[in-house]
Image (spheres, rainbow, N blue to C red):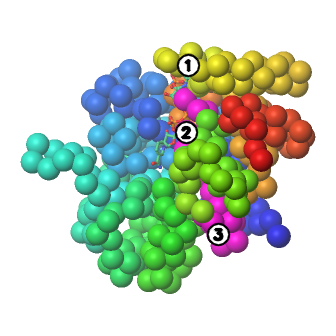
Amino acid sequence: MKKIPLEQRGITNSRIAFGCMGLGKSLNPASEEDILIAERAIDAALSVGITFFDHADIYSRGNAEAVFGQVLRRRPELKEQIVIQSKTGICIPDERFGKRYDFSKEHILASVDASLARLNVDHLEVLLLHRPDSLMEPEEIAEAFHTLRSSGKVRDFGVSNMSVSQIQFVQSALDEPLVANQLDMSLNRVDWLDHGVLVNRKIDKVVRFPEGTLEYCRMQNIQLQAWGPLAQGRFTGRTMDPSTETERLTTELVKRMADEKESTPESIVLGWLMRHPAMIQPVIGTANPERIIACGDAVRQSEIMTREEWYALYMSSRGNDIP
Ligand SMILES: NC(=O)c1ccc[n+]([C@@H]2O[C@H](COP(=O)([O-])OP(=O)(O)OC[C@H]3O[C@@H](n4cnc5c(N)ncnc54)[C@H](OP(=O)(O)O)[C@@H]3O)[C@@H](O)[C@H]2O)c1
């Protein structure tokens, strides 16, 4: 299949995205410490060529966007260098109501206005529907998207955590193609691969990935974005509690490969994701500048990783062999 470069898909030429979920943790939009953490993270990302920033209206209850916006207020020239994506559709639980999703036109429009105000920008490059709303109506979503696009507030739209049939359902009422689907994919969450290799086999494990979604997104040029791509550090130096033997052995393998290639464990883990021909865009969630910089060799690793090395990592993290 013909590969279409990311920049021609109208989203970005940044092969890696920076995920902003870890910013604004003190929940105080004026916290000088949080603003500095955000600024250092943005600078570290830019220093390794990451110009695409992934937000959501709910991250740190809006404070991730707010502290990011404070950095842009102080350094407006950064706006020329970066592309911003945000998400809508998950409501922050309040005293009256618990967890819920909302793809109503009213909610989508209000959420985007609030994100733009917090971020201190006049438009978003991409808006994602964060998680499927059981009550969604494609026509209502289409109305909201039309209003946002025609007012110049959002350029492109995508989804997150959606299956192929859900994407088709949303797309059925839209004039313009959805451009992205953000999913949980990493060396720790390999269901996106398992669903393919376990076809026609007695399933020996639960596979939590909607069949055909990967292939559909590739055929439709819907950018696959991977959330959780560093596996929260479990193969790159963080000891999980509890940790498993599989994690320990995979961590050793990742470290060995990094040493052999004069690289870093982070770049091996991300390079493994990016080696897949689907041209997955990892959305890294570390706010630690050193760790962000350690991701900077991932593109190179994805280009030089052999099939043998790729499968060795897949098998190791899986803990047992494929058929
Ligand atoms: N669409 C969705 O539903 C969805 C869901 C979740 C996340 N996301 C997006 O995806 C991004 C990434 O998600 P994620 O944060 O779960 O994934 P991640 O990039 O796999 O993990 C990042 C987290 O792991 C920690 N970490 C990484 N390496 C470490 C190490 N060696 N030692 C200790 N801690 C380490 C980081 O802490 P430090 O900051 O201290 O490095 C950070 O908390 C988010 O920022 C968000 O933009 C989207």
The residue that label 1 is drawn on is 243
Q: Which residue is drawn at 71% across and 61% down?
A: 200
In the image as oriented, which residue stretches furthest toward the left? 96
Q: In which quarter of the image is the N terminus?
A: bottom right
Judged left or right of residue 285, residue 273 is: right
Q: Earlier in the sequence, mark 2 or mark 3?
A: 3
CA distance for labels 1 and 3: 35 Å
Give amino acid for label 1: Ser
Give amino acid for label 3: Tyr
Q: Which of marks 2 and 1 is nearer the N terminus?
A: 2
Task: Mark 1 and mark 3 in contact? Answer it, CB < 8 Å.
Answer: no
In the image as oriented, which residue stretches furthest toward the front? 202
Judged left or right of residue 142, residue 11 is: right
CA distance for labels 2 and 1: 17 Å
Helix, strand or loop under label 3: helix
Q: Position of residue 167 (x, y in %)?
A: 50, 70
Helix, strand or loop under label 2: loop
Q: Can residue 21 be seen in this view?
A: yes
The residue that label 2 is drawn on is 228
Give residue 216's mark: 3
Vertical arrangement, residue 156 with respect to residue 286, above or below:
below
Q: Quadrant for residue 256, please give it.
A: top right
Q: Residues within 10 Å of mark 2 (few under 14, many from 20)?
A: many
Q: Earlier in the sequence, mark 1 or mark 3?
A: 3
Label 2 near ligand 1 (CB < 8 Å): yes
Task: Mark 2 and mark 3 in contact? Answer it, CB < 8 Å.
Answer: no
Q: Where is residue 292 in the image (x, y as percent from the top left)?
A: 62, 29
Instruction: Please provide the residue range marked out in magenta.
Output: 212-232
**Viewer-nearest residue: 11 or 258:** 258
Q: Quadrant for residue 148, please give it.
A: bottom left
